[in-house]
Amino acid sequence: MEVLSRVLKKTEDSGLIQGFHVGPISSTGIRISHLLFANNTIIFCDASREQLLSIRLVLTCFQAFIGLKVNVGKSEIVPIGEVSNIHNLANILHCRVGSLPMIYLGMPLGTSYKTAFIWNPILERMEKKLAGWKRLYLSKGGRLTLLKSTLSSLSTYYLSLFTVPKAVVMRLERSIGKMALEIWTRNYSSMAEGYGHEIWGGEMGLEH
């Protein structure tokens, strides 16, 4: 993938593709034409037939020389704003047309952090983990461990990037509070039944 990154950078330096500018317009800043992580790649360019043809040439050469094949079935071209000829551009790369917001490496792209959509993965993971503990009878220490474990499992990467909306915090608190109450109720009922059985058994064993 390092080879692909170098070729894309060279293509950008040659003016064949244009990424996006980061930093104040008045300063030099930097331009980003692509992001790579493992076998996941995002390429940024203008909605230009010529630039798409350049990208296709780069990918074709990469496949020929390196032997790695681009998975067209998982590839998308995602427009930002209105692009009237988006389907024609998609045909150049033989890929489908996607849309924002989208998920890339587990992170949302093209949406506000206040949108509930981006927090659903965290909430669903937490609720799924809590549900798995419902069948267990836990002591007070066990309940504390459960809550700490659940909270620590929240994506710190998410929390380092976004401010958690109040509605999401309230949903987290409700889920954890409800789970803690259910566990406490189960344990209390179990203890009460146990004590009752011991007392009743003792009385049945007495003879006068």
Image: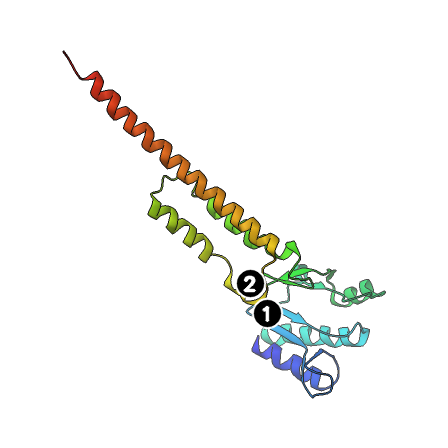
Can you give x and y, in whole percent of width and height, for residue 92 in the image? 77, 68
Spot occupied by residue 95 in the image (x, y as percentages of width and height): 73, 62
Residue found at x 64% / y 66%? 70
Q: Is residue 108 above or below residue 61?
A: above
Q: For residue 158, what is the image quadrant?
A: bottom right
* Image: 92 above or below 17: above
Q: Which residue is pictured at 75% across the width and 82% down the height?
A: 16
- Residue lying at the far left of the rendered structure: 208
Q: Quadrant of the N terminus?
A: bottom right
Observer-nearest residue: 197 or 81? 197
Distance between mark 1 and mark 2 Cα atoms: 32 Å
- Residue bearing mark 2: 158
The quadrant where residue 6 appears: bottom right
State the image coordinates of residue 7 (x, y, percent, origin top left): 64, 81
SS at circle 2: helix
**What is the residue that sits farthest to the top in this orientation?**
208
Q: Residue at x 76, y 67 (%)?
A: 80
Which label number is shown at residue 68? 1
Q: How many numbered tags mark residues here?
A: 2
Going by the numbered disc 1, the residue's amino acid type is Leu
Whichever of callouts 1 and 2 sits on the residue coming sooner in the sequence is: 1
